[in-house]
Image (spheres, helix red, strand yellow):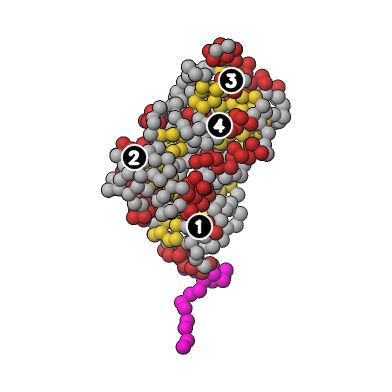
Amino acid sequence: MDVYQEYAAKLRTPEEAVEVIKSGDWVDYSTNVGFPYLLDRALAKRRDELCDVKIRGNLSFGPIEAVECDPLREHFTYNSWHCSAYERQLCDRGLCNYIPMIFHLVVPYYRHFLTVNVAMTSVTPMDRHGYFNLSCAAGVAKGILECADIVILEVNEHLPRILGGFDESIHISQVDYVVEGVHPPLPQFPMEKPTREDILIAEHILPHIRDGATLQLGIGAMPNVIGTMLCQSDLKDLGMHTELCGDAYYELWKAGKLTNERKSFQRGKGVTGIVFGSKKLYDWVDMNPGVIIEPLEFVNDPETIARIDNMISINSCIAVDLYGQICAESVGLRQISGTGGQLDYVTGAAMARGGKAFICMPSTFVDRQGVRHSNIVPHFEGDIVTDPRSQAYFIVTEYGVVNLVGRTTWERAEMLISIAHPDFREDLIRAAEKQKIWRGSPRCRI
């Protein structure tokens, strides 16, 4: 049987394919634009036939029909490895539970500990060799599919075909069912407009970046601001090694800054694990020999990151306490996003020769009542610690940048208060005194 005959034998309608899902099953939806739109809709139609179906996904942009059709969670229970803005809203409504993780370990979790009865993901159309490209979800998709009892692929005509180092494709012989259908255009996420604080934070980081540096830019406005400012700088021959490839990298390439030619590892290749952004980004990564996608268990492995000289990691957080603990995923007990790959890159960049890991945040936020609060706090009270104080390096606000490596508790308090908003510094000093981590003015008698 040739690959086209095998394809025809495995072709089903979405409704036929999801008939394999049974009550009590664990079902996986993959990640970001790999979300199986048609299969999810078909599964939702089976709501009243099923009970206790558990679904895993992450960075799903919604709507998820299997969730929305079951507001009491009597039939489907959705869980996310990393919350998108949509999934955050589901958490607020009690319709999503977060799964704690570090991104480079997600597939090993599946391999060693988790059950996957049915895995479903979107892919590009099959090529003449019988391969489907896992596209923007390749960072985790192949490993999850290999762990599943039943594999269902949904062909999405809009997905870019992204070249890979390994595990970016799956062969028709490894698949149980294939479904086809019409899809809406891929969701787009253009670069956000920077705030004044974003620009000031970026200005503090730029002097630390040199020609030939390799960049990891996290999710959010701040990393994109860095990319925009680098486009306007005199820096050259920058590289890309990142968990997420967003529009900032496309803009750097268009400006002639992103060449990857001075990377000490995988030279000439911009490396990523997942992709989402604007249509121009999807067009750029499509069949581009300068961009390769690989599993996050490799891309995000700190040992891989540490092989790259002058590795610069730039990520955002929500708050930092005076001990140097970093929260990037919750406000109190409210889940906002997830650990993702932040700890991977904080660890790996710090290990790399010439590497630096930056965590950025505005010094304050304003709540819904219009009250301003400090993002540098005395100590956390229920906030989830994403990066432990033992792995806190460069912390940046609009008031400056400090490096906490090797610093005592009193030095950390002094340094962090120095980049806090001036309106909160006295309160923070009093808190540090109470916590016995404030030295005050040194007194010396000879």
Give the vertical position of 189 relative to 124 (above or below): below
Percent coordinates x, y for residue 260 in the rendering: 36, 41
Looking at the image, which is closer to me, 230 or 300? 300
Q: Quadrant of residue 297?
A: top right
Residue identifier under label 4: 141
**Could you tell which of marks 1 and 2 lies nearer the N-terminus?**
2
Q: CA distance from mark 3 to mark 2?
A: 37 Å
Q: Give the magenta part as a residue range.
A: 424-446
Residue identifier under label 2: 259
Frontmost of labels 2 and 4 is 2
**In the picture provided, is 263 more to the left or to the right than 156?**
left
Percent coordinates x, y for residue 129 in the rendering: 49, 19
Q: Quadrant of residue 3?
A: top right
For label 3, count other residues whose C-alpha is less than 10 Å away and answer few (under 14), some (14-19) or many (20+). Answer: few
Q: Secondary structure at mark 4?
A: helix
| Three-letter residue code for mark 2 | Thr
**In the picture provided, is 42 more to the left or to the right than 267?**
right
Frontmost of labels 4 and 3 is 3
Q: Secondary structure at mark 2?
A: loop
| Three-letter residue code for mark 1 | Ala
**Could you tell which of marks 4 and 3 lies nearer the N-terminus?**
4
**Could you tell which of marks 3 and 2 lies nearer the N-terminus?**
3
Give the vertical position of 321 relative to 272 (above or below): below
Residue identifier under label 1: 392
**Could you tell which of marks 3 and 1 lies nearer the N-terminus?**
3
Percent coordinates x, y for residue 374 in the rendering: 48, 58
Frontmost of labels 1 and 2 is 2
